[in-house]
Image: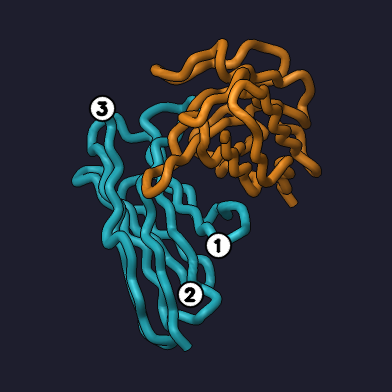
Amino acid sequence: ILNVEQSPQSLHVQEGDSTNFTCSFPSSNFYALHWYRWETAKSPEALFVMTLNGDEKKKGRISATLNTKEGYSYLYIKGSQPEDSATYLCAFSSSNTGKLIFGQGTTLQVKP
Amino acid sequence: GAVVSQHPSRVICKSGTSVKIECRSLDFQATTMFWYRQFPKQSLMLMATSNEGSKATYEQGVEKDKFLINHASLTLSTLTVTSAHPEDSSFYICSASDGTYSNQPQHFGDGTRLSIL
Protein backbone atom coordinates (compact mmCIF):
# COMPACT_ATOMS: atom_id res chain seq x y z
CA ILE A 1 0.00 0.00 0.00
CA LEU A 2 1.44 3.34 -1.03
CA ASN A 3 1.39 5.88 1.77
CA VAL A 4 1.95 9.61 1.78
CA GLU A 5 2.65 11.28 5.12
CA GLN A 6 2.66 14.98 5.87
CA SER A 7 4.03 16.68 8.94
CA PRO A 8 3.22 18.51 11.02
CA GLN A 9 -0.55 18.00 10.96
CA SER A 10 -1.07 21.63 11.94
CA LEU A 11 1.02 24.70 12.51
CA HIS A 12 0.41 28.11 14.07
CA VAL A 13 2.87 30.90 13.27
CA GLN A 14 3.03 34.65 13.63
CA GLU A 15 2.84 36.94 10.63
CA GLY A 16 6.33 37.40 9.23
CA ASP A 17 7.62 34.01 10.38
CA SER A 18 9.05 31.64 7.83
CA THR A 19 7.89 28.06 8.00
CA ASN A 20 8.26 24.73 6.30
CA PHE A 21 6.55 21.38 6.24
CA THR A 22 7.33 17.92 4.98
CA CYS A 23 5.77 15.40 2.63
CA SER A 24 7.11 11.83 2.73
CA PHE A 25 6.33 9.37 -0.04
CA PRO A 26 7.55 6.01 -1.36
CA SER A 27 11.02 6.36 -2.88
CA SER A 28 10.42 3.59 -5.39
CA ASN A 29 8.38 3.99 -8.59
CA PHE A 30 8.32 7.77 -8.40
CA TYR A 31 6.67 9.69 -11.20
CA ALA A 32 5.49 13.04 -9.85
CA LEU A 33 4.83 14.99 -6.68
CA HIS A 34 2.12 17.67 -6.47
CA TRP A 35 1.55 20.43 -3.93
CA TYR A 36 -1.86 22.08 -3.53
CA ARG A 37 -3.12 24.89 -1.31
CA TRP A 38 -6.67 24.47 -0.01
CA GLU A 39 -8.30 27.48 1.60
CA THR A 40 -11.48 27.05 3.59
CA ALA A 41 -14.63 27.10 1.44
CA LYS A 42 -12.58 27.15 -1.76
CA SER A 43 -11.22 24.52 -4.12
CA PRO A 44 -7.69 23.14 -3.89
CA GLU A 45 -5.30 25.22 -5.99
CA ALA A 46 -2.25 23.72 -7.65
CA LEU A 47 1.05 25.16 -6.44
CA PHE A 48 3.70 22.90 -7.95
CA VAL A 49 4.13 19.71 -9.91
CA MET A 50 7.61 18.27 -9.49
CA THR A 51 9.08 15.38 -11.41
CA LEU A 52 12.88 15.49 -11.18
CA ASN A 53 15.10 14.60 -8.23
CA GLY A 54 16.66 17.77 -6.88
CA ASP A 55 13.95 19.93 -8.42
CA GLU A 56 13.30 23.26 -6.75
CA LYS A 57 10.28 25.37 -7.64
CA LYS A 58 9.24 28.82 -6.50
CA LYS A 59 6.06 30.85 -6.64
CA GLY A 60 6.32 34.18 -4.87
CA ARG A 61 7.15 33.51 -1.23
CA ILE A 62 6.46 29.79 -1.54
CA SER A 63 9.05 27.30 -2.69
CA ALA A 64 9.40 23.53 -2.75
CA THR A 65 12.21 21.01 -3.03
CA LEU A 66 12.16 17.39 -4.05
CA ASN A 67 14.30 14.40 -3.07
CA THR A 68 13.03 11.32 -4.87
CA LYS A 69 15.87 9.04 -3.68
CA GLU A 70 14.93 9.44 -0.03
CA GLY A 71 11.24 10.10 -0.67
CA TYR A 72 10.54 13.57 0.68
CA SER A 73 9.58 17.06 -0.41
CA TYR A 74 9.69 20.25 1.62
CA LEU A 75 7.40 23.24 1.18
CA TYR A 76 8.75 26.55 2.44
CA ILE A 77 6.85 29.77 3.05
CA LYS A 78 8.97 32.86 3.59
CA GLY A 79 7.53 35.70 5.66
CA SER A 80 4.12 34.11 6.27
CA GLN A 81 1.06 36.31 5.83
CA PRO A 82 -2.48 35.76 7.14
CA GLU A 83 -3.61 35.02 3.60
CA ASP A 84 -1.26 32.02 3.58
CA SER A 85 -3.56 30.35 6.12
CA ALA A 86 -4.77 27.17 4.42
CA THR A 87 -4.30 23.44 4.31
CA TYR A 88 -1.36 22.39 2.16
CA LEU A 89 -1.71 19.02 0.47
CA CYS A 90 0.92 16.96 -1.23
CA ALA A 91 0.11 14.14 -3.61
CA PHE A 92 2.30 11.40 -5.05
CA SER A 93 2.05 9.60 -8.35
CA SER A 94 3.83 6.37 -9.22
CA SER A 95 2.78 6.28 -12.87
CA ASN A 96 1.76 8.52 -15.74
CA THR A 97 -1.95 7.78 -15.33
CA GLY A 98 -2.88 10.94 -13.49
CA LYS A 99 -3.72 8.96 -10.33
CA LEU A 100 -2.66 10.80 -7.20
CA ILE A 101 -2.28 9.58 -3.63
CA PHE A 102 -2.80 12.42 -1.22
CA GLY A 103 -1.38 13.07 2.23
CA GLN A 104 -3.66 14.28 5.01
CA GLY A 105 -2.38 17.82 4.68
CA THR A 106 -0.71 20.39 6.91
CA THR A 107 -3.04 23.12 8.17
CA LEU A 108 -1.28 26.44 8.57
CA GLN A 109 -2.70 29.28 10.62
CA VAL A 110 -0.89 32.62 10.39
CA LYS A 111 -1.76 35.07 13.16
CA PRO A 112 -1.60 38.79 12.39
CA GLY B 1 -8.22 29.92 -16.35
CA ALA B 2 -8.84 26.22 -15.59
CA VAL B 3 -12.05 26.66 -13.62
CA VAL B 4 -14.03 23.65 -12.46
CA SER B 5 -17.57 24.04 -11.20
CA GLN B 6 -19.15 21.41 -8.95
CA HIS B 7 -22.81 21.26 -7.93
CA PRO B 8 -24.47 20.99 -5.55
CA SER B 9 -22.22 22.16 -2.75
CA ARG B 10 -24.34 20.53 -0.08
CA VAL B 11 -26.98 17.84 -0.08
CA ILE B 12 -29.04 16.52 2.81
CA CYS B 13 -31.42 13.70 1.97
CA LYS B 14 -33.12 10.62 3.29
CA SER B 15 -31.66 7.15 3.21
CA GLY B 16 -32.48 5.34 -0.03
CA THR B 17 -32.37 8.46 -2.19
CA SER B 18 -30.10 8.68 -5.22
CA VAL B 19 -28.00 11.82 -5.47
CA LYS B 20 -26.34 13.22 -8.58
CA ILE B 21 -23.27 15.47 -8.38
CA GLU B 22 -22.10 17.41 -11.44
CA CYS B 23 -18.58 18.45 -12.28
CA ARG B 24 -18.03 20.90 -15.14
CA SER B 25 -14.89 22.34 -16.66
CA LEU B 26 -15.82 25.90 -17.62
CA ASP B 27 -12.91 27.10 -19.73
CA PHE B 28 -11.03 24.02 -20.90
CA GLN B 29 -11.71 20.57 -22.24
CA ALA B 30 -11.39 17.97 -19.54
CA THR B 31 -10.18 14.78 -21.14
CA THR B 32 -10.00 13.19 -17.74
CA MET B 33 -11.94 13.78 -14.56
CA PHE B 34 -11.21 12.31 -11.16
CA TRP B 35 -13.64 11.72 -8.31
CA TYR B 36 -12.40 11.76 -4.71
CA ARG B 37 -14.01 11.18 -1.35
CA GLN B 38 -12.80 12.54 1.97
CA PHE B 39 -13.96 11.24 5.35
CA PRO B 40 -13.36 13.40 8.44
CA LYS B 41 -9.68 13.78 9.34
CA GLN B 42 -8.62 11.62 6.43
CA SER B 43 -6.93 12.35 3.13
CA LEU B 44 -8.59 12.72 -0.25
CA MET B 45 -9.12 9.20 -1.58
CA LEU B 46 -9.43 8.58 -5.29
CA MET B 47 -12.66 6.75 -6.12
CA ALA B 48 -12.53 6.61 -9.89
CA THR B 49 -11.03 8.07 -13.04
CA SER B 50 -13.28 8.92 -15.94
CA ASN B 51 -12.29 9.63 -19.50
CA GLU B 52 -14.67 11.27 -21.94
CA GLY B 53 -16.69 8.74 -23.86
CA SER B 54 -15.48 5.66 -22.05
CA LYS B 55 -16.31 3.73 -18.88
CA ALA B 56 -14.85 4.94 -15.63
CA THR B 57 -12.03 3.07 -13.94
CA TYR B 58 -12.83 2.45 -10.28
CA GLU B 59 -10.31 2.08 -7.48
CA GLN B 60 -10.24 -1.10 -5.44
CA GLY B 61 -13.04 -1.22 -2.90
CA VAL B 62 -15.28 1.30 -4.67
CA GLU B 63 -18.56 -0.24 -5.85
CA LYS B 64 -19.22 0.77 -9.44
CA ASP B 65 -22.92 -0.05 -9.16
CA LYS B 66 -23.18 2.19 -6.12
CA PHE B 67 -21.25 5.12 -7.55
CA LEU B 68 -22.29 5.62 -11.16
CA ILE B 69 -19.99 7.87 -13.17
CA ASN B 70 -20.83 9.34 -16.54
CA HIS B 71 -18.43 11.46 -18.60
CA ALA B 72 -20.48 12.09 -21.71
CA SER B 73 -18.75 15.27 -22.86
CA LEU B 74 -15.40 16.99 -22.58
CA THR B 75 -16.82 19.45 -20.06
CA LEU B 76 -19.14 17.39 -17.86
CA SER B 77 -18.84 14.39 -15.59
CA THR B 78 -21.48 13.25 -13.13
CA LEU B 79 -21.31 11.05 -10.07
CA THR B 80 -24.55 9.43 -8.93
CA VAL B 81 -24.65 7.89 -5.48
CA THR B 82 -27.43 5.33 -5.85
CA SER B 83 -29.67 4.39 -2.93
CA ALA B 84 -27.51 6.38 -0.55
CA HIS B 85 -27.18 5.28 3.07
CA PRO B 86 -25.76 7.06 6.12
CA GLU B 87 -22.35 5.44 5.59
CA ASP B 88 -22.15 7.23 2.22
CA SER B 89 -22.18 10.58 4.02
CA SER B 90 -18.90 12.21 3.10
CA PHE B 91 -17.25 15.04 1.20
CA TYR B 92 -17.03 14.33 -2.52
CA ILE B 93 -14.80 16.40 -4.80
CA CYS B 94 -13.94 16.22 -8.46
CA SER B 95 -10.91 17.34 -10.38
CA ALA B 96 -10.26 17.70 -14.07
CA SER B 97 -7.28 17.63 -16.35
CA ASP B 98 -6.85 18.21 -20.05
CA GLY B 99 -4.77 15.05 -20.25
CA THR B 100 -4.22 11.82 -18.41
CA TYR B 101 -0.75 12.69 -17.27
CA SER B 102 0.65 12.79 -13.78
CA ASN B 103 2.97 15.70 -14.60
CA GLN B 104 0.00 18.01 -15.07
CA PRO B 105 -1.81 19.76 -12.23
CA GLN B 106 -5.40 18.83 -11.51
CA HIS B 107 -8.06 21.52 -11.30
CA PHE B 108 -10.57 20.96 -8.52
CA GLY B 109 -14.18 21.82 -7.94
CA ASP B 110 -15.36 23.17 -4.59
CA GLY B 111 -16.67 19.80 -3.43
CA THR B 112 -20.05 18.47 -2.30
CA ARG B 113 -20.90 17.74 1.32
CA LEU B 114 -23.33 14.81 1.30
CA SER B 115 -25.33 14.01 4.42
CA ILE B 116 -27.67 11.03 4.42
CA LEU B 117 -30.19 10.93 7.24
- Name the amino acid type tagged 2: Arg
State the residue position of label 3: A1
**Residue B20 horizontal/vertical position (percent):** 70, 28
| Chain for disc number 1 | A
Which residue is tagged 1?
A39
Same chain under badges 3 and 1? The reply is yes
Q: Label 3's element? A: loop
Please, what is the three-letter code of the amino acid marked with disc 1? Glu
Is tag 1's residue or tag 2's residue first in the polypeptide sequence?
1
The colour of chain B is orange
Q: Residues within 10 Å of mark 2 (few under 14, many from 20)?
A: few
B23 up-or-down from A52: above or below: above
Q: Residue at x 65, y 34 (%)?
A: B13
Name the residue type under label 3: Ile
Residue B10, percent across and down?
Answer: 66, 45
**Residue matched to label 2:** A61
